[in-house]
Amino acid sequence: MAGFIIRRLLYMIPMMFAISVVTFIIIQLPPGDFLTAMTARLASQNETIDPGVIAGLRERYGLDQPWTVQYWKWISGILLHGDFGQSLDWNKPVSELIWARMGLTMVVSVTTLLFVWAVAFPIGIYSAVRQYSLGDYFATFFGFLGLAIPNFLLALVLMFVSAQYFGQSVGGLFSPLYINAAWSWAKLGDLISHMWIPVVVLGTGATAALIRIMRANLLDELNKPYVDMARARGLSEIRLLLKYPVRVALNPFVSTVGWVLPHLVSGSVVVSIVLSLPITGPLLLNALFAQDMYLAGTFILLMSMLTLIGTLISDLLLAWLDSRIRNG
Amino acid sequence: MQHVRVLRRQVVSTVAAAILMGAGWAGAAFGFQEAPELKALTDAGKLPPVEKRLPKEPLVLTPLESVGTYGGTWRTATFGGGDSEIERSIGYTRLVRWNPEWTEVIPDIARSVEVNDNATEYTFTLREGTRWSDGEPFTADDLVWWNENVLRNTKITPAAPDWLTAGGETVKVEKLADNKVVFKFAAPNGLFLMNMATVRGSDILAAAPAHYLKQFHKDFNPDGIDALVKAAGATDWVQLFNNKIGFPGRWRDLGRPTLDAWVLTAPYNGTTQVVAERNPYYAKVDTSGNQLPYFDSITIDVMQDTQAIILKAISGEIDMQNRFIETTDARTVIVQNQQKGGYGLFIARPAWSNALLITLNQTHKNPALRAVFSNKDFRIGLSYAINREELNQLIYAGQAKPYQAAPREGTALYDEKMATQYLEYNVDLANQYLDKAGLTKKDGEGYRLGQDGKRITFAIDALTGSPIQVDALELIQRYWRAVGIDMQPRPAERSLIFSRLQNNDNDGLGWVGGGGYDFLGLLDPKWYFPHEYESSFATAWGLYYQNPKDPNAQEPSPAAKKQMDLYRQVQEAPTLEKQLEAMKELLAITRDEFYVIGTNLEPDRVGIVKTNMHNVPKVIPSTSFYMTPGPAKPETFYYQQ
């Protein structure tokens, strides 16, 4: 097993290298560069910038050099100094920008994940066990509704409701009073009172999908002979359910755990923009729009790495969960 | 024609005369008053008395309605990522500024300025005793330091901005006295003061507090700089220094001394909220000798989505603002929720003139399209083919009126013929003109054929971010199809549009039309003659004007060349009168050439202002060149208790 893990880790090195090159090429693909994007942004706001200043900046940022040189500058900084470069748009170190938003990003993402699991698993199991019951139809109906409503729309509606009927401030994770305050119980309470909107919005789609997956998988398992066998041995229904068929039904779910990790970082970009959440999603989107290549590149690199690590974790979990894989 | 009178009045006929005079404080005998919080600090001995903090003769601002009372927070919102709102609301302080009506340049931090007769020397007199927000004196030395160690240091400023150069040389600043400096240009630079009043002027004072900035400058802190660079995580000292003085980096620096009314207390980190509190050393007072500003603080919520800003506005969380909530589609909801949000409205008059102008690239790389686009009859034909009244009803809710891309009525540059020519909707006339342009052959589907026997087909780029313009273009597509012209609206991301422009790869563009107000026309004439590549009706000529050696540049037409000469005259003229004279001549050519097709005048927009907030003008020009709402004097806004 240790050998397996080490081998997998070693494979990740060339993979990461390949990803970093592809990432950089993709970021360079759109026409123009950071300064074109900046000029265009200013012009669309009816502002102008001096052509002479632009030329000076292009030289300063090294944007007049070929992409290979720019790539080398970036990747050698990461490898040799652990330096992810400077964001052109922010004039700040990339790592600082990302870490500054990582805390709240994790809070939002993990809470959402727990919310999804807490809601989806029991409902999924219930729907499978009581197939075609009133409760199942109810869950199915709302599940499809959750999948069908675009997240950004739900975000706008909930934001409107919370402002209109609960008198909450619009957008963000804190009331204006607490935005710049130090951490305290009151601030935590304020965070929690604002958090339900992003959690519900980000969670509905995933919850609905997970309910359907759980239900379908479990239905497949429930009629298998080993279930009858266990029942015949006199196990209580609930214990039987959780010990055997649910565990097997979790299999496809666990194999996608790998995708959860990068999702934790990128979050749902559109939703966090609509809700003005101070997390990483909007930063990534802005970086891509502004053609802020080092910031965008580092983000994508980070998410690729998390995908690789997540895949490794899900492989290990699968092996633990399913003896057929472990021994195969 | 009120506007014109005001403009004329400010032009002093004698050359070398002081064009700007500061209002002196005559009431020093009354003594000055200050905000209660500052009074408490003064009494506790933590601040010098108010007389010592103010200049000897502070600038007296006359409040629009009434002398105000201290207190309150002004809440606004901005759109994340380098937006200029913070610069406009807190940062509109410079040596000279716009007056609220946007008809002249008036003194701000400088007491007065004199221009010599060929616009090469500008002598600024500062107010004695003016202080930075940390209490250090602001003197001529600060401006000289900026000039020598920032602007003319090629490491920090690889290329000086155009408005600070003339005759190929960067401006030189010389000290005449502690409160007197002269800006010397190598050649006439008549637009210098106007440029200073725009967004550009902020950069000078931001880079002037020498006592603070020296520590970040390698020449002044050779030993300590490396540690500072490392601590800030910057690549080198130049980057660190530029972060301290440039936009938006300077708004992340809490220690920065300023001359603004409010001083930063929570930095602009791009996601949450910016807070600034009253500057105890602010150098302006009202007519009763009360030190300004009236508001204790200002907060700017950084949002990522404009819909969220509109929602904030209607739920009463914004006190005074027009940007982001003034779009045509938000107007209904903003107007309807006045009572609930506790706000009234003011008019935010767009400084650009046209809601949608359409350009056709006369320097197109494809000879067939170039021939068609350069034909004035073709453009006139297309203009007659547009049903502007229907556009107005369907797109602008009847708020706009048919208008060409021309200066607004009531301005000095207004030219009625230019504004109203070829506006009529007349399909027959349109067809006549298109026939006259030589496009008489049609294909099986009724589309006109070009010289090469192929159907004339082209795309008009528009911003995906401006859905209203895209909608309008789709209607225009129908109008033009009716006269046999195949136009495709092409919504595109702005970077893509701009790189097409830079490479002269564009067919045409749908954009808002600039130059509605006089100063906007003088400073940003890109829709009036080929000024830069953004002049998308003749991109390659615009490139030529900037740099004749540009690989995409083309030799302009004689008319365009004449305009380029005229604009040089505008830049060199020492007085506004002469500048406007040359500009009118330039615009007459624009009118005759009919470069761009206008549709409708951009309708007046509305901003919101809390019902108990006073001294806010009823009409405020809206554009970054005016720095809305900066010149409207937010330091004199107050809440009725």
Image: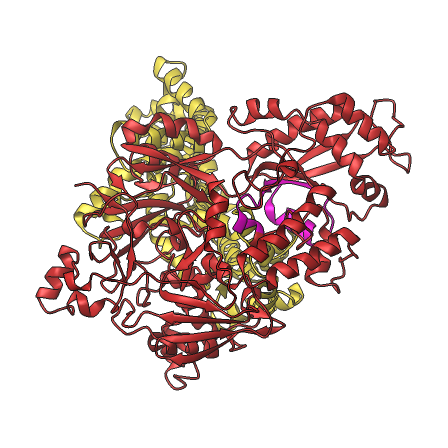
Residue A279 at x, y = what percent? 39, 49
Residue B117 at x, y = what percent? 54, 69
Residue B124 horizontal side relative to residue B529, left or right: left
Residue A78 at x, y = what percent? 51, 68
Residue A221 at x, y = what percent? 45, 26
| Residue B82 in view here | yes
- Magenta includes B509? yes
| Quadrant into which the C terminus of chain B falls | top left
Residue at (77% x, 49% y) in the render: B363
Residue furthest out toward the left: B44
Number of marks present in the image shown: 0
The stretch of residues the image draws in magenta is B492-521
- Magenta includes B362? no
Residue situated in front as seen by the camera: B107 or B91: B107
Residue B165 horizontal side relative to residue A90, left or right: right
Residue at (59% x, 75% y) in the render: B186
Residue at (24% x, 65% y) in the render: B281
Q: From the image, state the color of chain A.
A: yellow
Residue furthest out toward the bottom: B223
Q: Quadrant of residue B558?
A: bottom right
Residue A16 horizontal side relative to residue B613, left or right: right
Residue situated in front as seen by the camera: B471 or B71: B71
- Above or below for B478 versus B518: above
- Above or below for B567 versus A320: below
Residue situated in front as seen by the camera: B20 or A288: B20
- Above or below for A145 versus B564: above
Residue situated in front as seen by the camera: B564 or A51: B564
- Above or below for B601 versus A42: above
Could you say which chain is coloured red in the image? B
| Residue B243 in view here | no
